[in-house]
Amino acid sequence: MADLNLMAVFARVVEAGSFSEAARRAGTSRSAISKAVAKLEKSLGAHLLNRTTRYLSLTEIGAAVAEHCARILEEATEAERLVGSLSSEARGVLRVSASVAFGTLHVAPALAEFLPRHPELKIDLSITDRWVNLAEEGYDVAIHVSSDPPPNLVARPLAPVRRQLCATPEYFRRRGIPQTPADLMQHNCLDYTRSGEPGRWRFTGPEGEISVPVNGPLHVDDDEALSQAVLGGLGVGLLPTFIVGKDLQNGNLQAVLSEYIPVERHVYAMYLPTRHLPNKVRVFIDFMLSHIGAEPYWDRLSA
């Protein structure tokens, strides 16, 4: 196959009508243009131009080749224009995967503010706790809670994930407020089975790490379902504030032992490493960072 760069030079020579004018427009020398055309002729095994000291004219084969080269140059120019447009503006389709709780409570509601700012952009949002393969499945961004994001992805922290021990005020009136982690052994502790070891909660206090055996009538693998059981007065739960922040603020839930719970995980926006990050990805992540805030709005609500 002939070199596309040589074909582009030939198309420009035909358009300009001379080697000299083509060289002037390209900002190069006449001899460089002439050598490029000669190299193309050798590659194709065909004579493309009749040259005299004053004029250039196309051979029959040259005229046919020139038509195709002009079309190739036009397509290449359009491709460059399209890439520049897509890189500078947020447009096209942005495919986002977000974990169920965070995606439902915080990503989906934020789109009502984000999308009107970018009318040329559409979002394909998948709400799932499954870790998608961005490269194989064609996703642009994955938003997940993690303590150790995958090393093959760029992971930008959107917010810390703080957990709070909480129950309803009515539950604490009945059972008393725990003053130390050890007091939890006397309470109905509703266990989230995807975190830590079942039946044991770990805390960090002035005396270091504390491991407390807990017991209760419910073990559940979903934080939102756990929060509903806690709101129903069934017992004490260790819940992310991005789920229960509003309930802590409005008094539906009461937090205890906050000083014993470390921040161990973050919400990350993750994408594939690239030298040229698409603008649609950049503006989306920047918006989410601004929307959430340096101190997440759900923690400001629960302060």
Image (tube, rainbow, N blue to C red):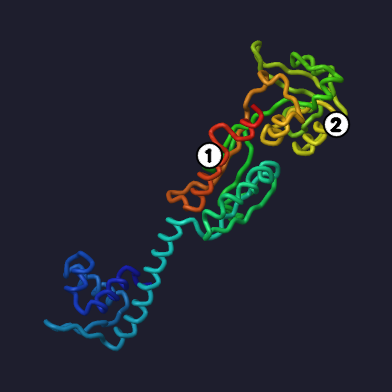
Q: Is residue 149 above or below residue 83?
A: above
Q: Nearer the viewer, residue 165 or 51?
A: 165
Residue at (75%, 23%) from the top-left corner?
Answer: 201
Residue under label 1, please give it: 156
Name of the residue lying farthest toward the front: 250
Crowd around label 2: few <14 · some 14–19 · many ≥20 (10 Å): some
- In-front residue for pair 299/269: 299
Task: Give the crowd class for mark 1: few <14, some 14-19, many >=20 residues within 10 Å.
Answer: some
Q: What is the quadrant of the C terminus in the image?
A: top right
Question: Which is more toward the observer, 65 or 163?
Answer: 163
Query: Mark 1–mark 2 contact, CB under 8 Å?
Result: no
Q: Position of residue 271 (x, y in %)?
A: 54, 46
Mark positioned earlier in the residue sequence (1 or 2): 1
Secondary structure under tag 2 reads loop
Vertical position of residue 77 compared to residue 152: above or below: below
Residue at figure coordinates x 72%, y 31% from the top left: 250
Which residue appears at 21% of the width and 70% of the height?
A: 33
Coordinates of residue 76 in the picture (x, y in percent): 38, 69
Q: Which residue is mark 2?
A: 218
Q: Is residue 285 left or right of residue 36?
A: right
Res 43 label: none
In the displayed structure, would residue 132 be above or below residue 169? below
Q: What amino acid is labelled 1 in the image?
A: Arg
Q: Amino acid at mark 2?
A: Leu
* Number of numbered discs overlaid on the protein picture: 2
Q: Position of residue 145 (x, y in %)?
A: 64, 38
Q: Quadrant of the N terminus?
A: bottom left
The Cα–Cα distance between marks 1 and 2, rounded to whole angstroms, is 35 Å
Question: x, y (%) of residue 202?
Answer: 71, 21
Q: What residue is rendered at 26% in x and 82% in y?
A: 47
Q: Residue furthest top?
A: 207
Q: Of helix, strand and loop, which one carries label 1?
A: strand
